[in-house]
Amino acid sequence: MRIRKPWSKIRNAYGRSRPGQDRNIRKDADKTMLFLSRLVAAVFAAMLVYEVWFLTVRREDTINNSYNARLDSFARQVVRGRITTNDGTVLAETVIGADGSETRTYPYGALFAHAVGYSTMGRTGLENLAHFYLLSSHGNPVEHMFRELTGEKNIGDTVVTTFDLALQQTACDALGDHRGAVVVMEPSTGKVLAMVSKPGFDPNTVSLDWDTLVSPDNASAQLLNRAAQGLYPPGSIFKTVILLEYIREHPDDYGDFRFTCDGSYEAEGYTIRCYHGNVHGTQDLKQAFANSCNGAFAYIGSCLDAEKLAATAQELLFNSDMPVALPYTESSFSMEKDADLWERLQTSIGQGKTQITPLHGALLAAAAANGGVLMKPCFIDHIENAGGDRIRSFQPSVYGSLMRPEEAAVLAGMMRAVVEEGTASALQNDRYTAAGKTGSAEFEGGRDTHAWFIGFAPVTDPQLAVSVIVEEGGSGGAAAVPVAAKLFETYFSRALAIR
Ligand SMILES: [Zn+2]
């Protein structure tokens, strides 16, 4: 009988072993090593993916989050970069005093108050949107390292915006002392060339003026960016939506539309009057749109399918998110399918409960000008390091199609008629062709109407889309169209001079 010693078992398992066992153990060890090395590789790859994701996606969000402690550390290492117009004119920069103090200055003061914003009492406008880039620094690496070693701050990158100084100045001057807003865009790229909101404020002294600016007694609401956040009744610019819906419901016979206007439209005891009691006579669809005949459009509105109209309004970004990186207010269209006739009539001439922002008006004009395709509005053209080398460019991107190309073509043709034979005839000239829609929106009994114009130019190959509101300016044709005319004049006279 063979007696097995306990230690021999152990030795067989872990010490000397038989030749076959030896190979198996090595195989097991190899497998374990392989598993471990794959695990390490997987963990490393995951870390790498996370790092890349963080650097490209989350880092920007994290740094932009004002509650994040990283923010302070970035600001301690980097002097906030410049913000410039599209041609490099400085709109915001940090000036370092002899004692090392830093002062954020805005050479154009109120002119870019809402567009560029401020960074001293929280952050708004481009100061907020571009915060990450302004606190990033891509200077010469050697100089960078030297500055870090000596404890000197690096200079943040420069944010080159899409803003055009001449157009911004023209918009501001043309609004004069009126409250209101202007947005100017390039339909084919979405570049926002001007964004003005009045009244403005001086971002250089915003912290000193803060108590007055936010006081409940301050009725001017200067801090509100009316361009993107101001909600207004659309008045007759909403006829673009009604027109589009009518064409959709009558694709084959909208050309046969006729309405005889005697100055008002009456139905079931309700009366809708044309602006200033105008009598338009017999109108086809194009004439009714060009002359902004309330009677014709009230009649059209009473015949439309309310559910389909609501769907079209939503497609045109009412009650919807807009592809806008700056804070904005959603426009609202709230007419229910069982709304009574009075609300349907009011809605069809842009009164009632519908509200829209000037920026949204610009997007509608830009989409109509661009074959129905809306480009995402963009505010930053590119980023440069402090030495002027371009380090990142932003390409135009498509948001989506708001209407079919053939619908956009019909709408653009009707908008052209508004200039050729209708309420925006002041835009007729021999230097460029313009198209658009005026509006005169009532908002409170006894007060003058808000004046609207949305439009674009030139008609073929549009280069500018504009949206103008002049609060209590009167009629769109008399008060908003001249603002658009000055913008087109500034832009096209310069284009001709360059040629
Ligand atoms: Zn009429």
Image (spheres, rainbow, N blue to C red):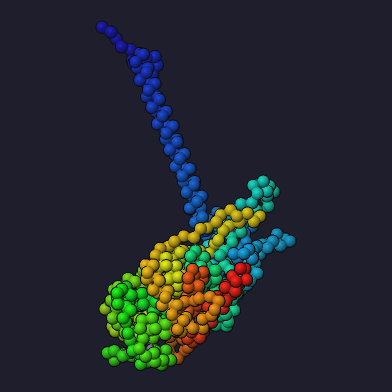
Q: Residue at x 42, y 74 (%)?
A: 412
Judge whether residue 75 can be spotted in this image.
Answer: no
Quarter of image, res 269: bottom left
Q: Position of residue 132 (x, y in %)?
A: 55, 57
Q: Position of residue 250 (x, y in %)?
A: 30, 75
Q: Name the outermost residue toward the top.
A: 1
Q: Quadrant of the C terminus?
A: bottom right
Q: Residue at x 42, y 65 (%)?
A: 373
Q: Quadrant of ligand 1?
A: bottom left
Between 76 and 439, which is closer to the camera in this rendering? 439
Judge whether residue 61 can be spotted in this image.
Answer: yes
Between 14 and 281, which is closer to the camera in this rendering? 281
Q: Name the outermost residue toward the right.
A: 98
User: How many labels were placed on the picture?
Assistant: 0
Quarter of image, res 357: bottom left
Q: Residue at x 45, y 64 (%)?
A: 375
Residue 450 to residue 183: above or below: below
Residue 79 appears left or right of 482: right
Q: Position of residue 441 (x, y in %)?
A: 43, 83
Q: Quadrant of the N terminus?
A: top left
Q: Position of residue 52 (x, y in %)?
A: 49, 47
Q: Residue at x 66, y 55 (%)?
A: 387
Between 185 and 287, which is closer to the camera in this rendering? 287
Between 317 and 295, which is closer to the camera in this rendering? 295
Residue 338 to residue 128: above or below: below
Residue 57 appears left or right of 338: right
